Amino acid sequence: MSRLLHGGLVDRSLTLSFAFDGATYRGHPGDTLASALLANGVRLVGRSFKYHRPRGIVTAGSEEPSALVELRMGARREPNTRATTVELYGGLVAASQNRWPSLSFDLMSANQWLAPILGAGFYYKTFMWPSALWEKLYEPVIRRAAGLGRAADRPDPDPYEKANAFCDLLVIGSGAAGLSAALAAGRAGARVILAEEDFRLGGRLLSEFAAIGDGPARDFAAAAEAELTSLPNVRLMARTTVFGAYDGGTYGAVERVGDHLPVPAPFAPRQRLWRIVAQRCVLAAGAFDRPIVFPGNDRPGVMSALALSTYATRYGVSAGKTAAFFVNNDFAFAAALDAAEAGVKVEAIVDVRPDPALASRAQALGVRVIQGEVVGATGKQLSAVTVRTPKGSETLKVEALGVSGGATPNLNLATHMGGRPTYDETLCAFVPGALPPGMAVAGAAAGAFPLQDCLAGGAQAGATAATDLGFAVPPVSVPRAEGAPSGICAFWHVAAPGGFAFVDLQNDVTAKDVKLAHAEGYRAVELLKRYTTLGMATDQGKTSNMAGLAIMAHLTGRSIAETGVTVFRPPYTPVAIGALAGHHRGRDFKPTRPTPTHLWAKEQGAVFVEAGFWLRAQYFPKPGETDWLTTVNREVTAVRERVGVVDASTFGKIDLQGPDAGRFLDRVYINTFSTLAVGKARYGVMLREDGIVMDDGTSARLADDHYVMTTTTANAAKVYQHLEFCLQVLWRDLDVQLASITEQYAQIALSGPRARDVLAKLVDRADVSNAALPFMGVLETSVAGGIPARIFRLSFSGELGYEIAVPSGQGEKLVRAIMAAGAEFGITPYGTETLGVLRIEKGHVSGNELNGQTSARDLGLGKMASTKKDYIGRVMAARPAFLEEDRPIFVGFRPVDRAERLRAGAHFLPVGAEPTLANDEGYMSSVAFSPTLGHSIGLGFLKNGLARIGETVRAYDPVRGGDIAVEVCHPAFVDPEGEKQRG
Amino acid sequence: MGPPVKPEGDGGRNGADAKNSGGVRERDTALAGGRTREEGLTMRIPCPYCGARDAHEFSYLGDATLARPDPAAPDAIDAFAAYVYERSNPEGPHDEFWYHAAGCRRWLKVTRNTRTHEILAVGFARAEETAP
């Protein structure tokens, strides 16, 4: 056991049991999986991506490149989880990744002996040919060998949700700078959200023994948290990672609501995706401790100096029985001393600098300081390091080595809007450049590393944000913090022979790979990244990028500033797809929009279909009908011979009122509506301004200044938006008001020779005779015992037909009344399939014909167009190309051999012509089996079609192997004179 | 009666068949007035009626400086061709139409910097209209 005797912020009074690779271990509340593994002496936790080298825990935070594990089991199995951010809970189960057959003995580790040929660009160069082998052989083999964890193979059982938040100030990070910023703005009364990715607030304050005011840093953090909690205008969000900065002060964040529990609490999601809109933002995300590259630097036990210290101070864990440090800066030196103070047996601090500022403090603590460089590390798990000093070389027997090459400000979010960081030679670090609007950066993230500067910078940033927003900010007092020096000597890479010296642990990129990229000309940082994959792993090179580009800078003889840095893009850390999807999955991918008669249709055994936004009855099978076509044929025949009923509520309905309503319709339809008599309806066609048909439908005039329009189901919103555009932008002088009433009315259609008989029984008093309510007539009355109704005598099927509109809440009552009234006439409910067959038999155009390529003339509706007025699309519809004689025109088709089946999508060719594009004469748009005629029928577009009725052409469908002779005919297969609907 | 005929698609009873058979009186499309767009993390537009709202509540139309040409002019067809098809792609401030579909249903004239997405000005398309 490596748990120190005392200290740390874990609750030693409680013990949690957990499993890793099948073995059971114990930890405490307050541990991460990483700290608990180290406390149990587990240092080997995974195998590397490419060479399958043994790997351990490297950091103590979300920047972890190495300790990736599979967390949980079964459907909840989550790959590539960073052990350093997983909060320990009782019963936790984790497994190592990318090893076979076992973590300790991995056959694939043979890859490392192939390293001389597996270097950067190996795959690009080697698997070039034969290219056919790539998909079948190379890729599967490479994917098996190189990889990370396995995703769960079953659907995620846990819920996720999305939420919005708005605030004056968003503070990202709760270290010294973040807490100070939140306090300054919160005390002024600003609405503050403080987001912290850790489960505990405090950041580095939890891990360092520095003093703030009269007490330890962690007491300051606790007091600040208590005060912020007491402020009603401040919201503290722990376990929340802000992963992206977007336009307009919008930030994306993911809150891990239930990740620290075996399963989420009842009615709580596992994770919640937040969209936070903030007037101002203070980025106080701290800094990363970056590595120094030297041979053997990936041995389990080699880790970040600050992490080694954090495990000791925050978690009460010594990462090895003995430890050493290898540093180039005072922060890490101070952290090493903190570790020693916490009880870690520190053999030595190896510092590349001759006279580190804290040498005397080390001496006082009895810690040896060596000036030199670590040039090698040995042991499958670290057992010794070799130190090169001016006097010679020395071996230190240690199980842990804390390495620090300096602090890299965590400016990831500051670059999401395109701002480029700039290099500061004194700090040896990139600091934020141009910032997203409304963002300020404070503390270590801004390169202001000393604790006093973090406190002051954070307070200043919080106060400035609140002042900008008009809050009266009380005088800000910054507590005095123990001053620590901030010296650093630029040092990136130990030039020493022997072994792998890794730059990017997660993608197994070595210093040698960077040299190879340089030698082969991939010298720009963006090329270096893509050629070697440096920084392209799930950690996005948070810790590794700096060393990589420093080595490249050295090789090219340029400065680091000249070499530049690759940019960060969202997300800051990986975000689960489940969180991004929220509840939008499966049936809830989009809202279900049932029609007003849905429950009734369900009772009737209807089969439903998603039609645009709606869920509609597709057909109504009867017991014994095993084939849908049998059902549809029965429904069609019932309508043609008796009467049928269908819910037509999904068509868009728009109410238009105002003295200019008629003139307005004249300008948006190709035909005239201002002359329409009150109490009458008319079919209308609308064009887009480019002359193509946009939509069709009927509009009825209820009063001089009152019309009601119907649109197709799919175009309801689009037409409404278009009409508002016309009124608000094009013709501001017209006095017309619009309202969408699609959802306010249920509209049920009755069709068939007995429709009037049913209607007569349904109306309370009105006369519905052919004289009183003629074709295209409109009647406002009441039905079924007092339901107010509008009755439109319209026909989509070609039969005698009526559409009855009632308030949508009454739709179900109406359809039941219709069924009761129609029982004696054999009334039959039908769905969208029969609706389609009926309209194809009648030759009406629909969505397949209004396809965004057809003009009114193409559709055979050109004669409707008025020549006495202007309307949207009139000018462009007269373009010569639209008037060419051999443009494909809407006609009907039937197979010459009536037993053949037509196919929509088939193209027409002259009989005997080669199937070439030049010979293409048009296409089939809609087909159906017509039970009325007993054979397949089709609608489509054929060059100069109307002049070719009676001709035979070839319907060629190479995709499905169809090639049949079809006869061109009039599109109305049933009742072309329209007598049935007028009768 | 001919032989049993399945709808186009050979996929059995599903929505795609219904569409392909030409049987349903609508286009099988999910586009409708901007309301279907999955909520993205996008810019915010200060609507004069509704206040600052996320861009996903709006539909975009484009250049707001174009005027519908005189349909009676002798060169109307050329003028309309330019009006319908010709657009410049400016870098920097751009006047454009946005429709607040999930809000007040007003057409807005928004001046947006195409480089930064900064919203520089917002007004009603109907210029004389003012917020209550």
Image: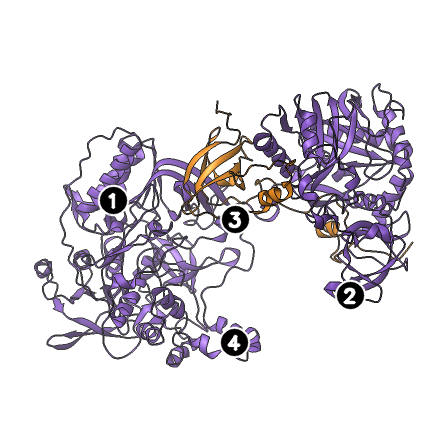
Chain colours: A purple, B orange
Q: Residues at marks 3 and 2, common chain?
A: yes
- Which amino acid type corresponds to the residue marked 1 in the rendered image? Ala
Q: Residues at marks 3 and 1, common chain?
A: yes
Query: Are the residues flagged by discs 3 and 2 in contact, CB closer than 8 Å?
Result: no
Measured Cα–Cα span from mark 4 to mark 2: 35 Å
Measured Cα–Cα span from mark 3 to mark 4: 33 Å
- Counting residues from the N terminus, which is met first, the one under dot 3 or under dot 2? 3
- Counting residues from the N terminus, which is met first, the one under dot 1 or under dot 2? 1
Q: Position of residue A636 (x, y in %)?
A: 86, 44
Measured Cα–Cα span from mark 1 to mark 2: 70 Å
Is A283 situated above or below A301? above
- Counting residues from the N terminus, which is met first, the one under dot 4 or under dot 2? 4
Residue under circle 3?
A581
Q: Residue at point 49% right, 53% down? A: A577
Secondary structure of residue under mark 1 = helix
Q: Residues at marks 1 and 2, common chain?
A: yes
Residue under circle 2?
A961
Residue under circle 4?
A138
Secondary structure of residue under mark 2 = loop
Q: Residues at marks 3 and 4, common chain?
A: yes
- The subunit carrying tag 1 is A
- Counting residues from the N terminus, which is met first, the one under dot 3 or under dot 4? 4
- Which amino acid type corresponds to the residue marked 2 in the rendered image? Gly
- Counting residues from the N terminus, which is met first, the one under dot 3 or under dot 1? 1
- Which amino acid type corresponds to the residue marked 3 in the rendered image? Ala
Residue A556 appears in view: yes
- The subunit carrying tag 3 is A
Q: Residues at marks 4 and 2, common chain?
A: yes
Which circle marks residue A177 in the picture?
1
Quadrant housing residue A378: bottom left
Viewer-nearest of discs 3 and 2: 2
